Amino acid sequence: MARKKNVDPTGNSQSSRNRAYLSIQRKIASGELPAGGAVSELALAKELGISRTPIRESIGQLIAEGLLEQSPNRGVVVVQMRRSDIVDLYELREALEVYVVGKVARQQIARSDLARLRKLADETLVLKDELTQTGATTLNAEQMHRQVASDLSFHTLLMRLAGNIRILKVVNETRLLIRIFAMKHRGHEVAELEEIHRQHGEILHAVAERDPERAMNLLTNHIQASRQERLSEFDHWEHEASLRENLPVFFGDR
């Protein structure tokens, strides 16, 4: 007798487990479930209208992927990034993405794909112009969300052009883990946006010119610069947290 599929109440053919997995992942990526935040099986089951079994299975998968972890006192929580985690993740990202961009640069890329990459890269200039027009010093939270989304889309499209789904999956998971920490990322300034656009533009030009060595060198520098930014921010937040703990009176905590 054929085994029945686990169908959700809405009639969607997507399995309840997959719905639960994607829901938790989206909550983590958006910051709705912040680093250190607890994950409630019961709340998710009620929200999605499914049993707790697929929720539990999805949580197990996300623990295996490094997005969630078991806490002795709080149950399952979103992973807290350590400095060494950031280094490890960027090393993995560099190894895979640099290899892939070299592969892509050896291919004949369709004009339509190059145009899509250019449009994604130019989103940074749109945000820079908004910043200039408003007179603000840095991007606000909504603008940073757009910047992160366009940056992710640019790199993801490059990965897709290589045609290796397994590498794409690992890179996406790696970038998601990095974004958990990046929820604390301060807004970019005009100079930073100009530099990001310049770097993306040079990478795109090397790919279009079918120059794999240059494309790989440029992407290596781009990823290493991003890693240094994240590490500097991590050190800043660690310092702030230490001051708050040891000198709470100066922060109005007591």
Image (cartoon, rainbow, N blue to C red):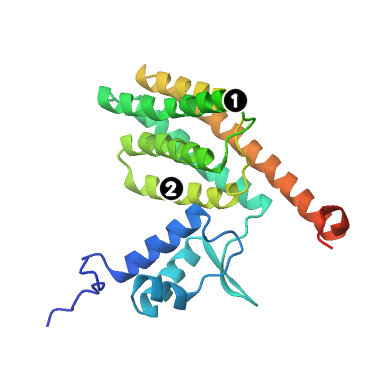
Three-letter code, disc 2: Asn
Separation (CA) of disc 1 from disc 2: 27 Å
Foreground of the two, 154 or 240: 240
* Local SS, label 1: helix
Q: Is residue 202 above or below residue 9?
A: above
What residue do we see at 46% from left, 74% from top? 43
Q: Where is residue 89 in the image (x, y as percent from the top left)?
A: 56, 47
Disc 2 crowd rating (10 Å Cα; few below 14, some 14-19, many 20+) is: some
* Local SS, label 2: helix
Three-letter code, disc 1: Val
Q: Mark 1 highlights which residue?
A: 190
Foreground of the two, 127 or 169: 127
Q: Position of residue 8 (x, y in %)?
A: 26, 72
What residue do we see at 68% from left, 50% from top? 83
| Res 24 → quadrant | bottom left
Q: Quadrant of the N terminus?
A: bottom left
Foreground of the two, 217 or 120: 120
- Give left or right: position of 148 versus 240: left
* Residue most extreme to the front: 134
| Res 111 → quadrant | top left
Q: Earlier in the sequence, mark 1 or mark 2?
A: 2
Foreground of the two, 100 or 185: 185
| Mark 1 vs 2: CB contact within 8 A | no
Q: Where is residue 62 in the image (x, y as percent from the top left)?
A: 46, 64
Q: Quadrant of the C terminus?
A: bottom right
Q: Is residue 111 visible?
A: yes
What residue do we see at 72% from left, 49% from top? 237
Q: Mark 2 highlights which residue?
A: 172
- Give left or right: position of 145 versus 209: right
* Residue most extreme to the left: 1
Q: In this view, does 121 lie above or below 95?
A: above
